[in-house]
Image (tube, rainbow, N blue to C red):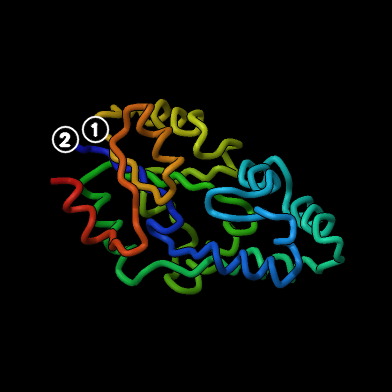
Amino acid sequence: MIKNIIFDYGNVIFDIDHQLTIKAFQNLGLQKEGAFFGHLQQNPLFDLFEMGKISPAEFRNEVRKIADQDFSDETIDIAWNTLLLGIRPGYLEYLNEVKTQYRTFLLSNNNEIHYNWINNYLLNEFNVPNMSSFFEMDYYSHIMGMRKPNADIFLKVIEEQKLDVTETLFIDDSPQHLETAKKLGLNTHLMLRSEDLRELLPKLLV
């Protein structure tokens, strides 16, 4: 029986489209480096940023170096944030319902620029400052100093929350993240873009 649910954020709760940022980077001349940024493969720069190992200023400076262009902070941020689409209508209300029946957590690979943009979006669109009220705890890679698919970030949540992995469901849109979760004994589901969380969860929790 599932008693705990760990949600990924991107394309589970918050819709994103990596192709939009890939195109935006192409327009800036950045994708000439090959797999500069993508869902499954990217420049190590992004991993460092998602683990909080470099600041937004350092991230932007590295982008300028790679592109060999003196882009403004705003130009880089706009391109980087292009992938962020938003939360589907009714999702936040549904998360509040689920929280009354299960222990729920958010586990997101994130970074300071996206995090700040999303919190501003949440305030403007839903009059909430962040996602904290919708979960027992929300975890972000850039604050924790670790990221999926590495096992340490999963173990941190499991141990801190004293979760029984056999009673815990992890939902993510990245196969490589699910592989680690499975090895740790978690129940998993690969979220597809065509799936709606409100229709999906009741089926998974039967």
Amino acid found under the numbered disc labelled 1: Glu
| Image position of 142 (left or right of 121) | right
Say which residue label 2 marks.
1
Residue 79, quarter of the rendered image: bottom right
Nearest the eye: 99 or 18:
18
| Image position of 7 (left or right of 47) | left
Amino acid found under the numbered disc labelled 2: Met
Of mark 1 and mark 2, the one earlier in the sequence is: 2
Q: Around disc 2, counting alpha carbons within 10 Å, would you say few (fewer than 14), some (14 to 19), or many (20 or more)? A: few
- Residue 133's mark? none
For the point 57% across and 69% down, the residue is: 20
Residue 166 to residue 197: above or below: above
For the point 23% across and 56% down, the residue is: 200
Residue 105 to residue 14: above or below: above
In x, y percent, where is residue 111?
61, 51
| Image position of 15 (left or right of 3) | right
- Image quadrant holding the N terminus, namely top left
Nearest the eye: 177 or 105:
177
Say which residue label 1 marks.
167
In x, y percent, where is residue 102?
24, 44
Q: Around disc 1, counting alpha carbons within 10 Å, would you say few (fewer than 14), some (14 to 19), or many (20 or more)? A: some
Residue 2, quarter of the rendered image: top left
In x, y percent, where is residue 147?
55, 39
Residue 95, quarter of the rendered image: bottom left
